[in-house]
Amino acid sequence: MLQEILPYLYLLAAAGFILALKWMSSPKTARLGVLAGAVGMLLAVVGTLLRFDVVEYQWILIAFFIGSAIGVPLAVLMPMTAVPQRTAISHSCGALATALIGTAEFYKHPQGGFTMAALVLETLLGFLTMTAALMAFGKLHEILPTRPITYKGQNIVNLGLLALAIAIGVWLVIDPTQTWLFPIFAALAMIFGVLLIIPIGGADMPTVIALLNSYAGLSASAMGFVLNNKMLIIAGALDGASGLILSIIMCRAMNRSFTNVLFGAFGQVQATGAAAAARPYRSASAEEAAQVLDAARSVIIIPGYGMAIAQAQHQLRELHDILTRRGVEVRFAIHPVAGRMPGHMNVLLAEADVPYDKLIEMDEINGEFPVADVALVIGANDVVNPAAQTDPTSPIAGMPILEAHKARMVMIIKRGMSPGFAGIDNDLYYLDKTLMLFGDAKTFVQSLVKELSANGQAAHA
């Protein structure tokens, strides 16, 4: 009886995964998408337990409670600003699980042919993704340097290690009895995962996160072929394909190629950054900035990683509310790679209950900047740098940007004049119509709200 309902459980689980991807593509249905994915995973786990003859459940229950004891606090206590780090850790744990299962299957049932080829792919992707995701976590959490770490001949060394690992994998497919080769194969994969990430700068972390998501999914799909589990094949393929598509979208958003992201060491500080102090710019106080906003009728807010670091999203919601009550049209311009992961700004602003219809994607909002009275930049840098359009020699030349420089007035909240992740100076800082607002984003936006509230009370009096 239980075996008869298994296909239906897997069918419902697959439907849940597909609907999750569909619904999570829009902020309005994202929560429903998360719920659909969770229900789908629950059905898949139940189906898997029914599929196999489980003799003793105590080990499964022990693993369940240990995993819950780690996962629940990780999800509940982790601040929204650290979602990229949590995502990287999740990729690492998932990849480690597939790699360990593949290792166990190799030593339990060594067999050649297609199954061994799938197992080799599973463990190769699993081990390299595990260590690569840990390195990504280190860069995101700034335990490791966010700048690229490079040395002469690095790409040759990296590709040589990968080629050696693949060669050993092919040997194992041909002759699975050479079990002594497997630890070497696994070690090479893990070392390659480390070396793959350290030359990648912080600016490329959104693409890296999406790419690692794809690797982990493909590893799980390969595991499905090893275990003859159709649900794993489906779920892994969906995960792998969606991660790859998202990576492509991220690369297009930066006008970059995969090879440039992985091997270009993008993010080294350029010489132009050192000369930034020699260029004249204008700054303003919170009181002066509030007067500009008070006179505006249309304001476009551009959030970036500086907003995330300062956790200023709730204060931005207050600013949005007070300006909206004054009849000002306020919208948020979202760049695809703003922050440290895809959708980073959307997640933070949604946490602050900013209305979904106020979050406007780059292609839709760029035409509105010429008629906007103020473009207010909160901690964004490279994604608003006009050099992408005006300087063919710039490292970000051709990168699609939010065209804040076309607004009638630009105000930028930033701690200092340092360059962004791309390592280059931002020409937007030095325009005649730009005002630099120096300080912590959260504190400065609080000051703006306070000044606007005081102005409003004075007007009523």
Image: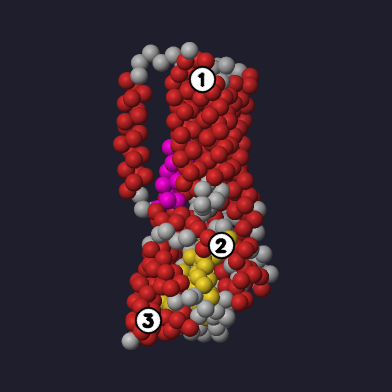
As drawn, is 322 to the left or to the right of 234?
Answer: left
Magenta residues, start to end: 82-94
In-front residue for pair 52/34: 34
Residue named by callout 1: 6
Let me know if residue 166 appears in the view: yes
Q: Under tag 3, what secondary structure? A: helix
**Magenta residues: mostly which secondary structure?**
helix
Could you tell me the amino acid type at mark 3? Gly
Residue named by callout 3: 456
User: Which residue is at a point 48% across and 83% down the rendered structure image?
Assistant: 295
Relative to 367, is 29 above or below?
Answer: above
Name the residue furthest front.
460
Let me know if residue 451 appears in the view: no
Residue 31 percent across, percent down from the top left: 46, 46
Q: Tell me if label 3 and label 1 are in contact, CB under 8 Å.
A: no
As drawn, is 447 to the left or to the right of 344?
Answer: left
Within-10-Å neighbours for mark 2: few <14, some 14–19, many 20+: some
User: Which residue is at a point 57% across and 53% down the rendered structure image?
Assistant: 152
Q: Tell me if label 1 and label 2 are in contact, CB under 8 Å.
A: no
In-front residue for pair 444/222: 444
Within-10-Å neighbours for mark 3: few <14, some 14–19, many 20+: some
Could you tell me the amino acid type at mark 2? Ile
Marks 3 and 1 sit apart, C-alpha to C-alpha, by 64 Å
Q: Is residue 84 magenta?
A: yes
Within-10-Å neighbours for mark 1: few <14, some 14–19, many 20+: some
Residue 34 percent across, percent down from the top left: 47, 42
Residue named by callout 2: 360
As drawn, is 42 to the left or to the right of 410?
Answer: left
| Mark found first going from the N terminus, 1 or 2 | 1
Q: Is residue 434 magenta?
A: no
